[in-house]
């Protein structure tokens, strides 16, 4: 009996490995191998279009310290992350709370707010280039109508990055809203009723009931948002190409520039590895701080 | 029923298995069949100016294919110059370059560094290339006395101006010096209640590093040598300081884009524009006002940097393809086609015989503006032909942008760009020497 149990067990383990194999192969070939290879490249002088590579040791990493643009790019990326994530999640939460009711026609509003998520990012970028156009753009016309000064938006090194942040909030809020909306459905309504009977106002209800109870989802949305914001490339490529005066150059775009415009694959790999360490560190930080405060409705 | 289905599919499966070895042989069969068909060439090209260039190039390639049954050229539009060069370099990386491509002439050293270019000196000498091509254009494709490309669409920037706007401001001729440029720009800038309606001058963004070299040359400085750049020289600092003064004076925007600036000019949002002569035909025919074309104003002298691109032929391909590539490059640059191409775009025809052709002569009589860039090209030299060109021009553009945005002083920005650029040139040369 025990013999046959061991046999069955072994069979199951083999089956499990066999089922895992395809995805393991994919991960190995398309994720782990490139990471290892890019680390190897970062220690070399590697030029796109040329098969020869030369050992450099730490030279590429030392270059990084001396590269003013790299630090500016890092700052831009941090600015983008630290503005886009809190703002788009706040907007998403408010939208989700507002739309979490059983009134007629709510699904139309939900679709409307989710709609930007479905627009391909390149098309969205092109549309916003038009919206932001200094001369004839609708946004400037609206500002003028309200008696506010017109802005040069994407042509102004002070406003270009905030302009992209604004557009990202428009693009991502709907996505976060949808996830948060699903979480809101799981909050027991008797809690709200009890609070209402005790005379608790809507703001307190939001902060002290809704937010703690959907905190696992909020945490998930923050991590996803973090990953999104470090991968921002398409808008920069389509809308500004990193300009004006490098004010919208972000890490992924800088990696692309170094690797494909300047053929400097070694240096591009160095920046990519730095980015990897950075994102891992940041997510670790978020897990250790925010992650600790997540409330799992008695499932802990 | 179901069992008969099963046997059928099993039979199919067996048949398919049996066919695999035969399919494995098929590439060989296909290849030998192809040998008797036309030679297929891929040709990657950019659109570097304003206008419907894509349609014109596709039309020329279609004509070539119709006239040459033994050759089939596939025209691949690859975006901007930078995009095109990237695509070619990436395909060189996997040893499958296109047969021909059309980069900016400044990329010559980059492609030579990759050992990618076919040396066409002997073919050209046996032909009439050295006699009939204008030497200034041919020089942009020569390195160490060897020829690596046939100039196809040379250009210089020119000064376009809105004659109606000039007339309204009481000005009847184009500015001839930097000082006049500034004065005229002030006069034609239009503000209503403090709100800007029209800039006096826009320097086409995206290629403003090219315009900047023109300004350096107007100051009697060629801002680069074979192995270094000279961006930190006083002549260059003076040029950038002059740009900054125009921005501070409220007559010129601190930043613009390449296609956007041409559209702004057409829409009347800027009265003067520095742009490539390759945009001439489009600007002239699309504008609702009369377009003037003039030399770029001088400071110490007139000066311009040669832009535009040559046709380059890949070294790493079969002799049969090289031969066909030469036929194609030769055809694209023959007298008749160059005269036609120049009229359709505003790019400069590369051959003396094309300029002398009767249809070109009558065109010039009708549109004298088409000759401005040719006359100016006697003051022109190649643009920034240094190793590591792509990063060097990014360093320069960054210095220009940040200065005009008011983030840094001209001298400090140019010194930084100079040092960064020279470090990059050293890095690339170290590689090539080892």
Image (cartoon, coloured by chain):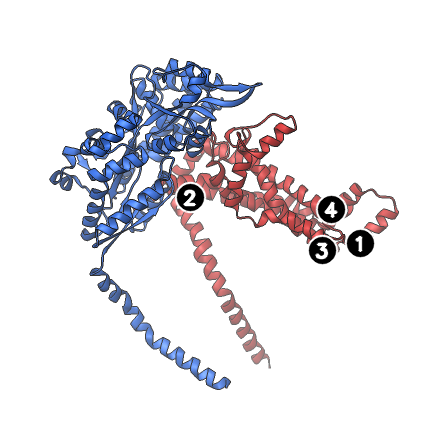
Q: Mark number for residue A300?
A: 3
Q: Are marks 3 and 4 in contact (CB under 8 Å)?
A: no
Residue B371 spot, x, y in % from top left: 27, 26
Query: How many angstroms separate mark 4 from mark 1 (CA)?
Result: 15 Å
Q: Residue at x 28, y 68 (%)?
A: B26
Q: Which chain is blue?
A: B
Residues A189 and B98: in front is B98
The residue labelled by disc 4 is A98
**The chain drawn red is chain what?**
A
Instruction: Return the residue at label 2.
Output: A269
Residue B268 is marked as none
Q: How dense is the environment of label 2, judged by Cα within 10 Å: few (below 14), some, or many (20 and up)?
A: many
Instruction: From the top left corner, tell me how far across and down residue A52 is, in percent.
Output: 29, 46
Of B323 and A159, the residue lying toward us: B323
Tell me the crowding category of disc 4: few under 14, some 14 to 19, or many 20 or more residues within 10 angstroms, Cα based.
few
Q: Read off the residue under disc 1.
A: A189
């Amino acid at each position: 009996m025990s013999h046959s149990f061991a046999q069955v067990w072994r069979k199951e383990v083999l089956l499990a490995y066999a089922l895992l194999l395809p995805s393991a192969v994919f991960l190995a070939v398309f994720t782990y191998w490139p990471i290892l290879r890019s680390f190897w490249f970062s220690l070399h002088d590697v030029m796109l279009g040329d098969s020869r590579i030369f050992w450099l040791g730490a030279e590429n990493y030392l270059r990084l310290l001396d590269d003013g643009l790299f630090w500016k790019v890092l700052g831009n990326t941090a600015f983008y992350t630290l503005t886009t994530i809190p703002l788009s999640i706040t907007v998403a939460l408010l939208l989700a709370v507002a739309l979490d009711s059983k009134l007629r026609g709510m699904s139309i509003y939900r679709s409307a707010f989710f709609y930007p998520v479905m627009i391909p990012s390149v098309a969205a970028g092109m549309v916003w280039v038009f919206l932001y156009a200094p001369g004839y753009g609708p946004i400037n016309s609206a500002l003028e109508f309200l008696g506010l000064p017109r802005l040069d938006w994407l042509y102004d090194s002070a406003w270009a990055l905030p302009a992209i942040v604004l557009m990202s909030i428009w693009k991502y809020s709907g996505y976060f809203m949808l996830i948060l909306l699903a979480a809101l459905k799981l909050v027991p309504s008797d809690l709200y009723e009890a609070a209402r009977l005790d005379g608790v106002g809507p703001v307190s209800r939001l902060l002290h009931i809704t937010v703690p109870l959907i905190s696992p989802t909020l945490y998930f949305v923050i991590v996803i948002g973090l990953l999104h914001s470090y991968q921002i490339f398409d808008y920069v490529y389509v809308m500004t190409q990193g300009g004006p005066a490098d004010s919208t150059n972000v890490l992924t775009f800088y990696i692309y520039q170094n690797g494909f415009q300047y053929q400097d694959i070694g240096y591009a790999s160095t920046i990519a590895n730095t980015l990897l360490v950075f994102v891992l560190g940041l997510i670790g930080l978020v897990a250790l701080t925010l992650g600790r405060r997540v409330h799992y409705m008695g499932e802990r | 029923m179901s069992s008969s289905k099963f046997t059928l599919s099993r039979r199919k499966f067996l048949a398919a298995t049996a066919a695999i070895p035969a399919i494995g042989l098929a590439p060989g069969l296909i290849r030998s069949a192809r040998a008797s068909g036309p030679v297929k060439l891929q040709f990657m090209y950019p659109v570097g100016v304003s206008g419907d260039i894509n349609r014109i190039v596709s039309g020329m390639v279609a004509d070539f294919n119709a006239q040459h049954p033994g050759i089939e050229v596939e025209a691949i539009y690859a975006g901007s110059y930078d995009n095109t060069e990237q695509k070619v370099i990436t395909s060189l990386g996997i040893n499958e370059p296109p047969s021909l491509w059309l980069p900016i002439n400044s990329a010559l050293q980059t492609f030579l560094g990759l050992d990618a270019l076919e040396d066409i000196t002997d073919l050209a000498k046996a032909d009439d290339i050295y006699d009939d091509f204008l030497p200034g254009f041919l020089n942009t494709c020569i390195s160490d006395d060897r020829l690596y490309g046939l100039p196809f669409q040379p250009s210089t920037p020119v000064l376009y101006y809105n004659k109606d706007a000039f007339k309204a401001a009481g000005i009847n001729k184009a500015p001839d010096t930097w000082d006049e440029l500034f004065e005229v720009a002030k006069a034609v800038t239009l503000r209503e209640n403090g709100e800007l309606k029209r800039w006096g001058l826009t320097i086409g963004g995206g290629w403003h590093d090219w315009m900047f070299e023109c300004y350096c040359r107007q100051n009697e400085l060629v801002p680069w040598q074979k192995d270094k750049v000279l961006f930190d020289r006083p002549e260059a600092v003076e040029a950038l300081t002059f740009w900054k003064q125009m921005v501070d004076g409220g007559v010129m925007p601190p930043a613009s884009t390449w296609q956007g600036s041409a559209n702004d000019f057409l829409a009347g949002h800027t009265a003067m524009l520095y742009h490539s002569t390759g945009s001439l035909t489009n600007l002239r025919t699309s504008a609702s006002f009369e377009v003037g074309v003039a030399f770029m104003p001088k400071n110490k002298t007139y000066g311009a940097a040669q832009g535009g691109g040559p046709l380059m032929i890949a070294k790493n391909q079969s002799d049969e393809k090289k031969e066909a590539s030469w036929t194609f490059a030769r055809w694209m640059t023959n007298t008749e086609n160059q005269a036609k191409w120049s009229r359709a775009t505003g790019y400069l025809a590369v051959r003396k015989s094309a300029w002398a052709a009767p249809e070109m002569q009558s065109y010039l009589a009708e549109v004298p503006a088409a000759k401005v860039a040719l006359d100016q090209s006697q003051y022109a030299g190649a643009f920034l032909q240094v190793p590591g060109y792509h990063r060097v021009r990014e360093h320069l553009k960054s210095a220009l942008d940040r200065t005009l945005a008011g983030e840094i002083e001209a001298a400090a920005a140019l010194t930084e760009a100079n040092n960064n650029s020279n470090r990059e040139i050293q890095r690339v040369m170290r590689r090539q020497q080892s």
